[in-house]
Image (tube, rainbow, N blue to C red):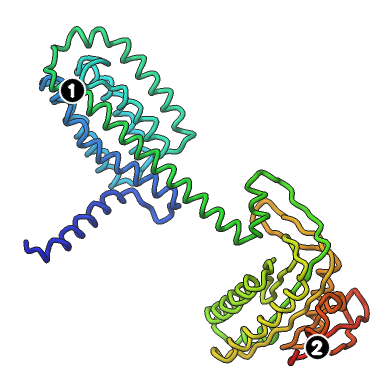
Amino acid sequence: MTTADAPGRRSSLAATLLRLVWIADDAADSDDVRLRKRVGVTAGFVTIIAPLSLPLQAGNTTLSWLLALALSGWAIGNLAVLRATRRYSRFVGALLGSGIVFVPAASFLGGGLTGPSSGLSWAFLLPAYAILAVGPRRATAWFAIYLGMIILMIIIDPTARASSPASPYEVELFGTVENGVVPLVIVFVLLRYTDVRRLAAEARADELLTNAIPASIAARLRHGERRIAEAYPETSIVFADIVGSTSWAHDTPPAQVVDVLDELFTSFDACADRFGLEKIKTIGDAYMAVAGAPEARPDHASAAVGMARAMLGEIERIRATIGVPIAVRIGVASGPVVGGVIGRRRLLFDLWGDTVNLASRMESSGIAGRIQVAGSTRALLPPNAFRFEPREVEAKGLGRLTAFVLDEEG
């Protein structure tokens, strides 16, 4: 084999080892189940090798060789049956069951609990392995079995010591180190694996939670609050709705529709981040955001109008680059709202109140490609910062109102 061939051979060997570890995988498995299976299968392969040190510690007797080779053969057969049947629960039960027999027997042949092949640490691997292989609930029974094995080894220890010849110091030292250190290293690896998995799961959960609801609300939920409802006295609500999307979507492949909406709403999210607004939700092709909740800010009206103008710019950019014949109609209103988390599944932070309804009406009665604000918003904006055109609108449920359309040059 040449030096150039070495990386390819190593890659091929790694791929083969991975295929062996993955023999219990099923396409329907969740990530957690798949990883549990891979840990279990890896333990099965380790069980082929681990017993082969017993003869050295037990005086190289025929019985010690028979026991060691029997467990190795059992492990090979157990893996072969798993590969043929994919019955993982049967595989785990057989693997754990073999430990119940082998650990006390090996301890007995090695001179008992104080001999070089003491099974105290190896016995603990049964409940530790069971936690990862079958889950913590089912592992409790295996912890009880572990305690029973210790009691059994204590009972047979006098007989084991009397029937076992004294071992050379080197053998005792090797056995003490191997049977003390190796199981503890395995337990450490299992604990580290468990904690890494826990931290990764928490990070994924936090990411999903903070993507669904505001970060400050997510933090309160993580700290145990069950019901969150707050009054926010000074806010500005932004409603945006895509105009012309229905006819365009009807004549456009669904994948392209989703791609365009994803790019558009992602750009709206960037606008919200840029101006410090909180995205509340999307409903179909409508988008809602708020300034001033859940974190208060005195310039909420200016921030909301600033975001609205940036959204119009994004629409123009997408329309120019992709050639999609759509526009957006945006409404803004300011005032008090009530906000809170609703539901127990698919949590949602939402807002309610007359201000929300007014912002929605500003959007629905507005003009495509323009921003229409309520009088409550216009009154909060800095003087001469923007130019508006007043217009009378009929707002559903609110009657006739004077709204203000932002001047395109303002």
For the C terminus, the quadrant is bottom right
Q: Quadrant of residue 342?
A: bottom right
Q: Residue furthest right?
A: 400
> What is the three-letter code of the residue carrying label 1?
Leu
- The residue depicted at 72 percent of the width and 74 percent of the height is 303
Query: Going by the image, does 1 lie left or right of 42?
Result: left
Q: Is residue 121 above or below residue 392?
A: above
Q: Secondary structure at mark 2?
A: loop
Q: Which residue is mark 1?
A: 173
Q: Secondary structure at mark 1?
A: helix
Mark 2–mark 1 CB contact (< 8 Å): no
Q: Is residue 51 above or below residue 216?
A: above
Q: Residue furthest front?
A: 383
Residue 377 in the image: x percent, y percent? 83, 76
- The residue depicted at 37 percent of the width and 35 percent of the height is 129
Whether residue 139 can be seen here: yes
Q: Is residue 153 above or below residue 186?
A: above
Residue 2 in the image: x percent, y percent? 7, 64
For the N terminus, the quadrant is bottom left
Q: Which residue is mark 2?
A: 387
What's the distance in space between the residues labelled 2 and 1, CA to CA? Answer: 89 Å
Of the image marks 2 and 1, the number of the one nearer the N terminus? 1
Query: Going by the image, does 38 lie left or right of 408?
Result: left
